[in-house]
Image (cartoon, rainbow, N blue to C red):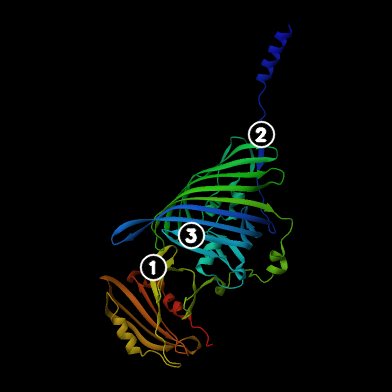
Amino acid sequence: MVCRAAVTLVALVACVPHAVAQVTLSEAPASGDCFRYHVELDLVGKMTIAQDGQKLDLRLEAKARHVFTERTLTVAAGLPVKSARHHDNAVSSTVVDIEKSNRALPADRALVVATRTSDGLFCFCPAGPLTRDELDLVTEHFNPQCVAGLLPGKAVNVGDTWKIDPAAAQTACLFDSLIRHTLTGKLTAAADGKATFTIEGTAEGIEHGAKVALVVTATGTYDTAAKRVTALTWKQKDDRDQGPIAPASKLTATVTVKREALAEAPKELADTALAALPRGDVPAALALLRHGDPKDRYALTYPRDWHITGQTDPHLILRLLDKGEFVAQATVVAWKKADAGKHTPAEEFKKAVTATPGWTASRVLEDGETTAADGRWLYRIAAEGKLDDQPVVQSFHLLAGPQGDQAALMVAVKPDKVKLVGTRDKELVNALSFPAKK
């Protein structure tokens, strides 16, 4: 009887449904929230360039480390829109083939304001313009403004799945625009006050004018008592088409994020420290980028829709993107210095322009001298013609400072893009400056 009773008891227990762990996975971002982040990036892969008519694959490796505190300033539709970040550390190292480069954010650019827009992430530094390398350093890491959108925002059982919010997907993938995605979250475990979830799927979008296809596998940890994500490992396989400012590449990237909530803002993000931040649109001067010639022959403080794509001793090459579309190319040349108060004669510059390799002018559109800002002398000639047998409109500018410093700027535009470029070639000339007399 005892044995039969025991068997009956086991059978009854087996018929009782197992309890299903249910967890509410939700975050409610609010203005004033402060988090401290440790972000590590490890990237390996290859980039493909064209050389002598052949495709050449180059090894590409990168590592980056970011330690920063973020304070949420504004929230919309359940996600942070604007945040202030103070970077304690932001460094990266990149190897392309055998060439290694290192980048670090200087202390005077540690405070950055990050705004999530429909066109991607926009960052600026209240202390003044960033360089392109500094801008890339503070934007090309995982953007934590997406975290709340990676969660379902409701109670789920272990094994349940949910579709990732499109705005969060775009933000997490660092796209300028999102084409489509299948990113799906899943609660995989819940015990001892912690829940583990995964995010898997694909995403396609546009970044800097190039199409990017991602395959994502991510794992996150959620603190059920604190009601927040505390850690995330984001892995992605990255297949990028050649774009107007970067070659094609195939990469594998792993980002690890550690996240700690702070009870109050540190002094660097306190109300007094942020009191001077612009409340409305970003002032035009803070939206600019800066570039210094390595030999201090000139400086450039320019709109960020111009992208530096190459540099030699005398030349700096930039490309203009308009909503990701390549519309113009500019070349800045460190021109020979003249005596103080002097400049290269216009006719001499015109002869140099005429001798530009591959260039044949068919119709002159503009030709004349003028006085630029701060009393600087400026000569400009613009013409229609062909460059390497391709129809273009080119403008050539020679700018001279009062101490005889000179720089030339050449801008090439396809005829159908002239109206789109507008006066941005002239604005780029005005962005040039010369070192002060020592």
Q: Measured along the vertical axis of the image, is residue 300 above or below residue 172? A: below
Q: Position of residue 189 (x, y in %)?
A: 62, 36
Quadrant of residue 18 within the rendered picture? top right
Q: Residue at x 32, y 71 (%)?
A: 415
Q: Position of residue 314 (x, y in %)?
A: 40, 77
Q: Quadrant of the C terminus?
A: bottom right
In this view, the residue in front, 422 or 55, is 55
Q: Earlier in the sequence, mark 1 or mark 3?
A: 3
Q: Three-letter amino acid code at disc 2?
A: Ala
Which residue sits furthest front?
98
In this view, the residue in front, 35 or 98, is 98
Q: Residue at x 59, y 58 (%)?
A: 66
Query: Mark 1 or mark 2: which is in front?
Result: 2
The local crowd at label 3, few if under 14, some if 14 to 19, many if 20 or more residues have their Cα within 10 Å, is some
Quickly name the residue at label 2.
21
Q: Three-letter amino acid code at disc 3?
A: Thr
Quickly name the residue at label 1.
327
Q: CA distance from mark 2 to mark 3?
A: 44 Å
Quickly name the residue at label 3.
94
Q: Quadrant of the N terminus?
A: top right
Q: Measured along the vertical axis of the image, is residue 281 above or below residue 180? A: below
The local crowd at label 2, few if under 14, some if 14 to 19, many if 20 or more residues have their Cα within 10 Å, is some
Q: Three-letter amino acid code at disc 1?
A: Val
Query: Mark 2 or mark 3: which is in front?
Result: 3
Q: Position of residue 406 (x, y in %)?
A: 43, 85
